Image (tube, rainbow, N blue to C red):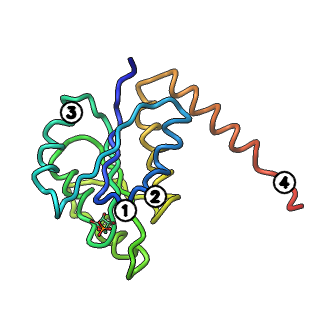
Amino acid sequence: MSKVSVSIIMGSRSDWPTMQAATRPLSDLGVEFETKVVSAHRTPERLVQFTADAPDRGIEVIIAGAGGSAHLAGMAAAMTHLPVIAVPVASKHFKGMDSLMSMVQMPKGVAVACQAVGEAGAYNAGLLAAQILALKDDALSQRLQVWRKAQTDSVPVEVE
Ligand code: RP5
């Protein structure tokens, strides 16, 4: 059985349509992941428990998506040494600018790898998680390089 090494957490089930994009590169590259709703504001105890347990459960990279006053990634990063990749989810009132600013403006000493707002950011979060894991997984590194070449080859030169 393959080991789940990436945990995708999100502040609400309403984030799932965006965060689902993070699963695509992971699935395509054969990286096992889990998905959970963990809210910094609504379920703070769950977040504490999650970050405490994650390393023992074999989690190596955390992807955290949230919208609005988006503290999830920063708080997760504050409580674990694991790398945390942040995905600002587009919000109702400010189109994700609030999510982006909440996630990207971390104080010195606690790092999160903040991605673009929305689906592209979620997709790239999955890709970056795979790239981190590939540093110590030669087979995954090979699959990533093949994937990158296929992407490059798929871009046409001509417009029409
Ligand atoms: C955040 O509040 C969530 O990450 C979500 O993006 C936003 C709205 O949540 P819901 O009210 O839709 O549950 O915590």
Give the CA separation, mark 3 to mark 2.
27 Å
Q: In the rendered image, which residue does mark 4 sit on?
A: 157
Q: Residues within 10 Å of mark 4 (few under 14, many from 20)?
A: few
Mark sitting earlier along the chain (4/3): 3
User: 75 or 81, which lies in front?
Assistant: 75
Secondary structure of the residue carrying tag 2 is helix
Q: In the rendered image, which residue does mark 2 sit on?
A: 17
Q: Is residue 39 left or right of residue 114?
A: left
Q: Residue at x 50, y 29 (%)?
A: 30
Q: Is residue 154 left or right of residue 13?
A: right
Q: Residues within 10 Å of mark 1 (few under 14, many from 20)?
A: few
Query: What label does residue 55 carry, if any?
Result: 3
Mark in front: 1 vs 3: 1
Amino acid type, label 2: Pro
Q: Please determine whether, in this image, residue 134 is positioned above or below residue 76.
A: above
Q: Please determine whether, in this image, residue 153 is positioned above or below residue 67.
A: above
Q: Kindly tell me whether mark 3's CB lies below 8 Å from ligand 1.
A: no
